[in-house]
Amino acid sequence: MPISPEILGQRLRSAREAVGLTQESSAAALELSRPAISELEAGRRRVSSLELARLAQLYGREATELLAPAFSEADPLRALFRAQPSLELNDELRQILLAWRHRARALTDLEAKLELPRRLCTAGQYPGNALSSRWDAIQQGERLAEEERARLGLGRAPAPELPMLLESQGVRTALVPLPDDISGLTLQERAQDLMILVNAGHATTRHRFSFAHEYAHVLIDRERGSIVSRAGDRDELIEMRANPSLPDS
């Protein structure tokens, strides 16, 4: 049963607010007036198929998702921007995150159409105990690395290429251009849908460390949802705990 214009308008407003966009910025992107966006969101103006497709892309959603009988307002980017408001002010970063989330969802839809097994995160998940000091964070990180190496059957052998290892466990990975002070991000759509983005602008030798660092967040910080690893937060205890993960030898 088709949804009403009022319900679609509510969903469009929720999707817009989730990614920190104003009616003015949405209107500018579609070359519409702000009142036109307001009318769409109030259900007083019907949205065309072209407008719906463009709005969905702008908000990092699928048009079919906005029209589906069941719609989830939960959005990992909303939680991420709420936790770190400065990220929401970075329009370039917001567009990068929206684009890559859109690609990940498109891949998920394609896999479903091809009847491929659904990609769910099968990586280990370890309890994250409260951290009391830098030394405690380092020790927990070292134990985490040892336990994960044992789970993977690596022993003391070098860890394989981390993007390949992560992909084999259902975690999507990508090298993307990010602001220089961000080494990587772990984005979590739902409990078992995760994606790691690492800064393509950093040196190649640093990429492995960044993938390993985000891998640790997947293993022990999954309940926190999406996480951004920034240079200014390197002394935070949860960031220090993530550093020793899966060394080369």
Image (cartoon, grey):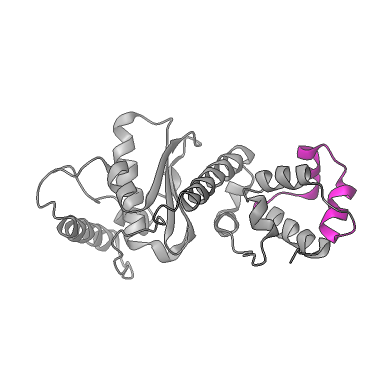
Q: Which residue is drawn at 58% across and 59% down?
A: 75
Q: Is residue 95 above or below residue 13?
A: above
Q: Main secondary structure of the magenta part?
A: helix
Q: Is residue 216 left or right of residue 74?
A: left
Of residues 249 and 132, the one drawn nearer to the viewer in this rendering = 249
Which of the 4 quarters of the picture holds residue 143?
A: bottom left
Can residue 43 be found in the magenta stretch? yes
- Does 168 lie within the magenta span? no
Q: Where is residue 105 in the image (x, y as percent from the top left)?
A: 53, 49
Which residue is found at the position 74% from the left and 67% from the top?
Answer: 1
Is residue 47 rendered to the left or right of residue 137? right
Give residue 16's position: percent from left, percent from top.
Answer: 71, 53
- Nearer to the camera, 37 or 88: 37
- Rendered image quadrant of residue 191: bottom left
Q: In this view, does 92 lie above or below 120?
A: above
Q: What stretch is highlighted in magenta?
A: 18-44
Closer to us: 44 or 150: 44
Residue 148 coordinates in the image, percent (x, y): 21, 58
The residue positioned 29% from the left and 50% from the top of the image is: 243
Quadrant of image for the C terminus:
top left
Is 102 situated left or right of 243 in this image? right
- Tell me if residue 83 comes above or below residue 163 in the rendering: below
Total labels: the figure holds 0
Q: Can residue 181 be seen in this view?
A: yes
Asked which quadrant contains residue 98, the reply is: top right
- Is 3 positioned to the left or the right of 91 in the image? right
- The answer, for residue 230, to whether it is visible in the render is no
Residue 145 in the image, given as x and y percentages of width and height:
21, 55
Residue extending farthest to the left is: 156
**Along the viewing direction, whichever of 204 and 58 lies nearer the viewer:** 58
